[in-house]
């Protein structure tokens, strides 16, 4: 399972905002810290604003901040919202599948169970968990890199 760049940037944005709650952040701040395209982040922030997770403040001294508390932002829900699909193989897409093995293939069921387990793990994590992990000693609060041990 691989997340799209869009989902990666969405998660990075939320982590950054969660770690900098004391001020408004700018898209440029996030782009600079992570070395990613400001144009891509503008799309991410727009969607986060529509979702209600992020508040955007217009104007000269504007920026963005979390609208919800970090413990109210479920990572599984964020990933489901930002990914277009979870098709692990061609046969998962009923519109374009041409696999002749589909009627008797056991692999599809195994991959479906693996995807469900993947999402179940993400469902057990909140933004608060990611922030706490990133901010503790040995974490990288500057780039909010999350590694679970």
Image (cartoon, grey):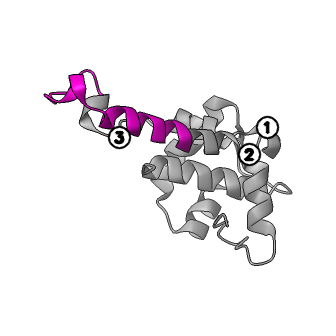
> Cβ–Cβ below 8 Å for labels 3 and 2?
no
Q: Residues within 10 Å of mark 1 (few under 14, many from 20)?
A: few
Residue lying at the far bottom of the rendered structure: 138
**Eyeballing the image, is 28 above or below 101?**
below
The residue wearing badge 3 is 88
Residue 62 visible somewhere in the drawing: no
**Closer-to-camera residue (4/19):** 4
| Magenta span of residues | 93-118
| Mark 3–mark 2 distance (CA, rounded to whole Å) | 25 Å
Q: Residue at x 75, y 78 (%)?
A: 138
**Closer-to-camera residue (132/101):** 101
If you read the primary sequence from the N terminus, does the residue marked by circle 3 or circle 1 appear first?
1
If you read the primary sequence from the N terminus, does the residue marked by circle 3 or circle 2 appear first?
3
> Cβ–Cβ below 8 Å for labels 3 and 1?
no
Where's residue 29, x and y in %? 64, 63
Q: Is residue 26 left or right of residue 85?
A: right
Q: Is residue 91 left or right of residue 73?
A: left
Q: Residues within 10 Å of mark 2 (few under 14, many from 20)?
A: some
If you read the primary sequence from the N terminus, does the residue marked by circle 2 or circle 1 appear first?
1
Where's residue 50, x and y in %? 62, 30
Where's residue 94, x and y in %? 27, 21
> Cβ–Cβ below 8 Å for labels 2 and 1?
yes
| Secondary structure of the residue carrying numbered label 3 | loop
| Secondary structure of the residue carrying numbered label 2 | loop
The residue wearing badge 1 is 72
**Eyeballing the image, is 75 above or below 145?**
above
The residue wearing badge 2 is 126
Q: Is residue 14 left or right of residue 113?
A: right
Q: Nearer the viewer, mark 3 or mark 1?
A: 3
């Amino acid at each position: 399972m691989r997340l799209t760049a869009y989902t990666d940037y969405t998660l990075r944005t939320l982590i950054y905002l969660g770690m900098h709650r004391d001020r408004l952040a700018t898209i440029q701040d996030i782009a600079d810290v992570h070395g990613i395209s400001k144009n891509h982040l503008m799309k991410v922030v727009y969607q986060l604003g529509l979702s209600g997770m992020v508040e955007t403040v217009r104007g000269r001294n504007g920026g963005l901040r979390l609208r919800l508390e970090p413990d109210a932002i479920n990572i599984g829900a964020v990933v489901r919202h930002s990914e277009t699909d979870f098709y692990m193989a061609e046969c998962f897409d009923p519109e374009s599948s041409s696999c002749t093995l589909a009627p008797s293939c056991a692999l599809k069921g195994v991959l479906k169970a693996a995807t469900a387990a993947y999402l179940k793990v993400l469902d057990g994590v909140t933004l608060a968990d990611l922030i706490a992990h990133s901010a503790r000693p040995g974490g990288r609060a500057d780039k909010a890199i999350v590694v679970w041990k």
